[in-house]
Image (tube, rainbow, N blue to C red):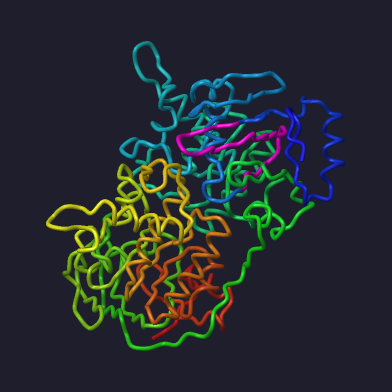
């Protein structure tokens, strides 16, 4: 496939590739607002981008699709000035430009919403939006005009953000809207969204899709990094696919399918259906009795008098809209927060007051919701993170000294088994890895502990379809080995496909127990919204 300078990277799978190439070649470069031509970026031990060409048309939503570690975020970080390419050029409106830092990008009207938001939590929404370009009157800060502009933009695009709210007090969805307003306030016309839906609820995702369509209709050009094929099919005009740093192709969305996109992304056919036998349910592993957990955000309790059981040989899923007590429930189960009343029983023992390490050593594994806060020590190496909960075991230490060779060997085995991609293998600093590969490292560590109970919170967040397929198989394999699995997910497809029982949480209470074989997504949605509940 020709990837010559200025040519578009078109899919060999696309029926329209050759006619499209000819049509666009005849139009010249004027229709492209941004062209990244033959971009290569090398880091120690890895070529993150290998001769990639990406061309963004004016007013389009252009998706960038690829596996974890395929080079998507690196490519967008080059466009935003966070990295410099090893080779290749960038053009805006047909003219070559140099983007040495984010200030240069902003001067070219390029804005970016990062996967992990860049907000100051103790500042208000308004202060975050104007940060770096604060309006002044003489020597004094003058926010009146800025407030009016932010309010007008919020109303125009349906963002519904309170400018006076502290960032620390607003939801993740609202934080994202604040990031979008930061771009709009700076009059950016090229908007980069890096995994924008990875931390959002289904309702917030629907709202974001509407906002992105409104922005495109207003003439903004959007680059949209995602793993979620449904979202690409719903709102994108075109999609460029990367695999292991190389450009596989660019396709028109109207001419392709989810199956074709997934095949281009991972290089093989991917099953979207979870293959599992009926559950073989055995004795109780986890028993929660009348648990109540206080809220850190408001005066009411986050979890209210909740009782349930999880048995060996089953996957129980707690479903609900984000913010209905699931986080506090999991924190109480795993020891991150104290319960105010009730009890937690694990393998017949009361662990209500047990420490996190005691729970871990007794056979509980936890894939946390926030991988940066509770899953990894970001400035440790990958191998150090792999043994965080086991380094004191005789396999990894002797007389108080870490057996480095054993740790290295163990980490290399998990890296290969779970396809954790990193530039320098076991000695890679965790912070430098892609979000999806950080997640795979945590999953590898937690499952390899061979736990009696696996508490998996949003385990496939930020993963590509190939990795999701693998993780779902791992969860089912744990169940089939007679382990108990407690899954907490916001992904309705995941809830319906993976679980054997569904417990629906609404406003801190369990409002229903459903059989995924006998219920529908619509009925599940009614329970999640509080419109329906199972009476005692």
Q: Residue at x 56, y 41 (%)?
A: 72
Magenta stretch, main secondary structure, is strand
Residue interval drawn in magenta: 40-65
Is 515 located above or below residue 146 in the figure? Answer: below
The percent position of residue 198, horizontal first and vertical second, equals 50, 52
Residue located 43% across and 25% down the image: 144
- Asked if residue 100 is among those painted magenta in the image, a careful observer would answer no
Q: Does the magenta stretch include residue 51?
A: yes
Q: Among all residues in the image, which is located at the extreme left?
A: 399
Image quadrant in which you'd find residue 258: bottom right
Q: In this view, does 354 lie to the left or right of 427?
A: left
Residue 348 locus on image (x, y percent): 22, 83
| Closer to us: 30 or 280 | 280
Q: Examine the rendering and report whether any part of residue 285 can be seen.
A: yes
Residue 10: x, y in percent? 75, 42
Q: 13 or 511: which is nearer to us?
A: 13
Left or right, 45 with reference to 70:
left
Where 245 falls versus 349 (above or below)?
above
């Amino acid at each position: 496939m020709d990837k010559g300078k200025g040519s578009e990277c078109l899919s060999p799978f696309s029926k329209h590739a050759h006619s499209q190439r000819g049509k666009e070649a005849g139009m010249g470069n004027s229709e492209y607002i941004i062209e990244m031509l033959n971009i290569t970026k090398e880091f120690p031990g890895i070529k993150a981008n290998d001769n990639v060409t990406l061309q963004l048309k004016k007013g389009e939503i252009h998706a960038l699709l690829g596996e974890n570690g395929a080079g998507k975020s690196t490519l967008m970080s080059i466009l935003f000035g966070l990295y410099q390419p090893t080779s290749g050029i960038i053009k805006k409106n047909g003219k070559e430009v140099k983007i040495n830092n984010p200030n240069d990008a902003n001067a070219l009207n390029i804005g970016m919403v990062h996967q992990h938001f860049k907000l100051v939590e103790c500042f208000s929404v308004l202060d975050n939006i104007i940060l770096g370009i604060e309006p002044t009157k003489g020597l004094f800060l003058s926010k009146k005009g800025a407030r009016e502009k932010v309010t007008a933009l919020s109303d125009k695009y349906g963002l519904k953000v309170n400018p006076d709210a502290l960032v620390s007090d607003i939801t993740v969805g609202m934080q994202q809207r604040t990031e979008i307003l930061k771009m709009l306030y700076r009059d950016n016309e090229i908007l980069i969204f890096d995994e924008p839906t990875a931390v959002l609820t289904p309702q917030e995702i629907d709202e974001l899709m509407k906002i992105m369509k409104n922005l495109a209709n207003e003439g903004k050009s959007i680059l949209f990094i995602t793993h979620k094929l449904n979202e690409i099919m719903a709102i994108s005009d075109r999609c460029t696919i990367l695999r292991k740093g190389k450009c596989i192709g660019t396709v028109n969305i109207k001419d392709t399918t989810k199956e074709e996109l997934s095949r281009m992304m991972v290089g093989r056919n991917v099953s979207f259906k979870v293959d599992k036998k009926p559950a073989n349910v055995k004795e109780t592993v986890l028993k929660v009795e009348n648990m109540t957990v206080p809220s850190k955000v408001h005066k009411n309790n986050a979890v209210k008098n909740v009782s349930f059981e999880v048995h060996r040989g089953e996957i129980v899923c707690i479903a609900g809209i984000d913010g209905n007590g699931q986080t506090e429930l999991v924190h109480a189960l795993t020891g991150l927060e104290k319960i105010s009343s009730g009890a937690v029983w694990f393998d017949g023992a009361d662990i209500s007051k047990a420490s996190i390490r005691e729970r871990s050593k007794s056979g509980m594994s936890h894939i946390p919701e926030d991988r940066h806060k509770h899953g990894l020590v970001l400035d440790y190496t990958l191998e150090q993170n792999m043994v965080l909960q086991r380094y004191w075991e005789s396999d990894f230490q002797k007389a108080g000294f870490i057996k480095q060779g054993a740790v290295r060997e163990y980490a290399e085995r998990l890296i290969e088994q779970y396809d954790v991609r990193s530039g320098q293998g076991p000695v890679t600093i965790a912070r430098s890895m892609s979000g999806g590969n950080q997640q795979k490292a945590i999953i590898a560590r937690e499952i390899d502990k061979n736990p009696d109970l696996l508490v998996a919170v949003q385990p496939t967040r930020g993963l590509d379809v190939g990795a999701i397929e693998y993780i779902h198989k791992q969860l089912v394999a744990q169940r089939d080995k007679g382990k108990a699995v407690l899954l907490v997910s916001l992904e309705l497809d995941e809830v319906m496909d993976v679980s054997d029982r569904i417990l629906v949480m609404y406003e801190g209470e369990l409002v229903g127990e459903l059989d995924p074989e006998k219920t529908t997504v619509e009925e599940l949605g009614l329970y999640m919204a509080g419109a329906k509940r199972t009476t005692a």
